[in-house]
Every structure is written in C-alpha cells, then in structure tokens.
C-alpha cells in the first residue's frame, strides 16, 4: 500500500473509508514492527560476533537492498533499580561517604518543575500583579499540545 493510495483515499473524501483505511494501515504497521523486532536479536548476535573480532562499536550487516546498522553504546552508570519505577536514593550516600569521594562520583542538580497544569498555571498567573505577570511571561509560555490520534486495532 502506497502513498498514492493514501492520497486517493483522502481525495475521495469518504470519512468511513478513510477511517477503515487508517485502521488497516495501522494493523500492517504493527505487524511489520513485530516482524522487525523479531529480527533484531539475530542482528545483535551477528554484530557481537563481528565486533568481538574487529573491536568496532558500530557494525554494518550488508544485504542486497541496504544495510542494518548495530551500534554498541558505551556502558552507562545509573542508580540501582529497586523494583518498578524505583531506584536507589543516591543522596543517602552523601552522608555516608567523604565529601571528596561523593563529589568526584556524583553531580547534584536542582530541578525546577511546574507546580500545575496549564489551566491552573494561567488561573494563578492572572491573579498576580501585572509586574510579576510580565516577568513570568519573559520566562514561561503556555503552548498548545498536538492532538493525539489513536487508530483502532
């Protein structure tokens, strides 16, 4: 199924036909995605064998119509997982390690997040003095979100 077919369906203008076509394309996309996912372990295994010999962190497996690239990223450091959506609290280490050790291994960051959603933010903003509103408008903006489309299965 091609872009030409999509253009023809859209030009036809029948809403029911467009919905049915979108659902069919979504099914094909999901099936194709599952097929590709099933192939990835094979490519990883092939690339690991080649990388073990060459030492490359970027391996190409060439076919007749193109190539598959397998990238071996460098190991990363992360807080130890303590179960679903939980990680070790690294700030607890600060009191247990000498300051120079903690500071050589970790970097503390301050994060400022919005306390409310856009409508609550705008309601609170409207109640502030004009000078504070003007100041905040130099730093913060409310932007429209892109509508999400969910295509049936």
Image (cartoon, grey):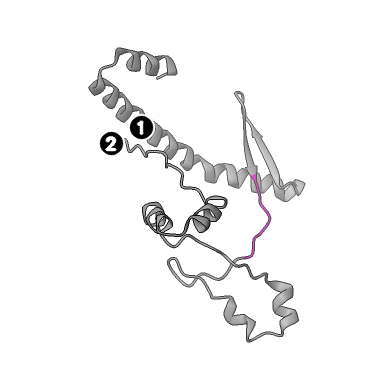
Res 148 → quadrant: top left
Left or right of 91 on screen, residue 28: left
Check disc 2: other Cα within 10 Å, few if <14, some if 14-19, many if 20+.
few
- Image coordinates for residue 41, horizontal then vertical, percent: 53, 46
- Asked if 152 appears above or below 139 in the picture, the reply is above
| Position in image of residue 18 (x %, y %) | 29, 22
Q: Are marks 2 and 1 in contact (CB under 8 Å)?
A: yes
Q: Quadrant of residue 1?
A: top left
Report the magenta residues as a range: 71-77
- Secondary structure at badge 1 equals helix
Residue found at x 64% / y 61%: 76
- Where residue 3 sits in the image (x, y, percent)? 43, 18
Q: CA distance from mark 2 to mark 1?
A: 8 Å
Residue 26, numbered label: 1
In the displayed structure, would residue 39 be above or below residue 19? below
Q: Main SS of the magenta segment?
A: loop
Name the residue: 41% across, 59% down.
Answer: 116
Label 1 neighbourhood size at 10 Å, few (<14), some (14-19), many (20+)?
Answer: some
In the drawing, what numbered circle is on residue 153? none
In the picture, the disc for residue 152 is: 2
What kind of element bears circle 2?
loop
Q: Quadrant of the C terminus?
A: top left
């Amino acid at each position: 199924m091609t872009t030409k077919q999509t253009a023809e369906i859209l030009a036809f203008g029948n809403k029911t036909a467009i919905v049915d076509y979108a659902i069919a394309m979504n099914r094909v996309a999901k099936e194709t995605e599952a097929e590709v996912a099933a192939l990835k372990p094979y490519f990883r295994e092939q690339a690991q064998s080649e990388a073990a010999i060459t030492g490359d962190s970027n391996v190409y497996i060439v076919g007749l119509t193109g190539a598959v690239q397998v990238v071996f990223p460098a190991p990363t450091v992360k807080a130890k997982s303590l179960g679903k959506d939980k990680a070790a609290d690294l700030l607890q280490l600060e009191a247990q390690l000498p300051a120079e050790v903690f500071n050589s291994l970790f970097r503390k960051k301050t994060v400022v997040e919005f306390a409310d959603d856009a409508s609550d933010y705008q309601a609170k903003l409207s109640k502030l003095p004009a000078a504070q509103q003007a100041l905040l408008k130099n730093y913060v903006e409310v932007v429209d979100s892109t509508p999400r489309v969910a295509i049936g299965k």
